[in-house]
Amino acid sequence: MTHQLDLNDAIQVKTALKVLSPGMYTIRYQGTRPTGSQSGQAQHSANIPLALSQAPINMAGEIEFICPEGISHQTLSAPGDYLIAHVKRGDAVLAASKYSPKPLAGKVDVQWRIESLQQPVGRTSSAPAQANQHPEPYVGKAANSLPLTLTGHIERRGDVTVNSGEWLGDPNGTARLEGLQIESNALPQGVEILGACRAGNQTLQAKQNNYLGTKRQATAITQLALCLGGENANNYQLDAEAIFSDGSRHSLGKQEAVRAATGNGHLVAVRLCIHSANSTTTNSHTATNTAQSSWLDPQATYVAKA
């Protein structure tokens, strides 16, 4: 007679809840480590999956999960695994459930991070009058940046390619920039470029060397987020800007998906370059650099007991 395994005796499930405000977030699995370990670096010492979902708690918001290739069922299980969560229409509760084999229960911690892609209010330029000004070039940054190209699909022009620091699209025009692809084979180990956008009714995501957006669908991008990811991301700086059809101009690269100041404009131009974080520091203190990166914010790092 076949003995049926009782999964409740074999696996321990623990769920953590976190309220998220509207916006876009990157959720990343860092790894596991023995409980009580003082090492700040998580290691892949055990395979303990982390399943993400929206908790059935009565709040106004909704969470849409965007999973890259290789991630299924909204489950992260290896260092570097990530997905993007788009919270809309109000606050919502994220449920993160850990599935630990009983022999590892209480012996292994799971470490994961949430990074908000939301831009602080003070960094948003909302004056439409800026559309009539010629945006200044990057001074000294593009020359010292990592080699990359930016290719995009522009309304009535088709595919256009520019170099690091140059504008993709017309910053003084209204033609839609319907998609973009950041191409670079020179990114340092442990550094990647993460992108997400809202195009029509879709929330899309892509890494470097992959296309983000649409083509030949006459679909505008209304929200855009770009940031650096990976274990060595803090050693580099992404200097990037986006301009929308209402003339509003926004910095990219640190926290939130940006949108037109009027709420109904579309993306018309983007420029970016990546360089060593040390190259932008003259008389800055370490504390200043720390404050610029939410990856170093202890409130964004979660260590969960298995």
Image (spheres, rainbow, N blue to C red):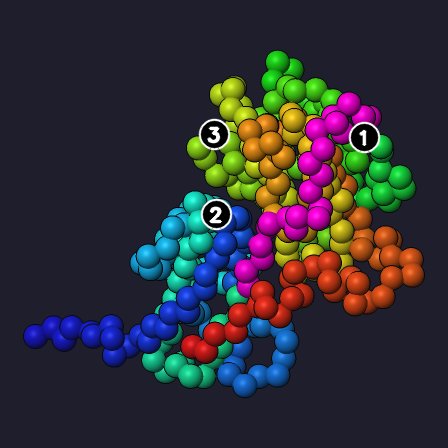
Q: Residue at image x 56%, y 72%?
A: 43
Q: Which residue was labeled with disc 2?
A: 86
Q: Which residue was labeled with disc 1?
A: 135
Q: Position of residue 296 (x, y in %)?
A: 67, 65
Q: Residue at image x 45%, y 84%?
A: 107
- Residue 126 left/right relative to 215: right
The quadrant in which the N terminus is found is bottom left
Q: What residue type is labelled 1?
A: Pro
Dot placed on the residue nearer the N-terminal end, 2 or 3? 2
Q: Residue at image x 34%, y 72%?
A: 13
Q: Can residue 150 be seen in this view?
A: no
* Residues marked 3 and 1 touching at CB (< 8 Å): no
Q: Position of residue 92 (x, y in %)?
A: 42, 55
Establish if 255 lies above or below 46. above
Dot placed on the residue nearer the N-terminal end, 3 or 1? 1
Q: Residue at image x 48%, y 39%?
A: 203
Q: Which residue was labeled with disc 3?
A: 200
Q: Can residue 305 be seen in this view?
A: yes
Q: Give the range drawn in magenta.
A: 113-135
Per the image, label 2 sits on a secondary structure element best described as strand
Dot placed on the residue nearer the N-terminal end, 1 or 2? 2
Q: Distance between the residues labelled 3 and 1?
A: 27 Å
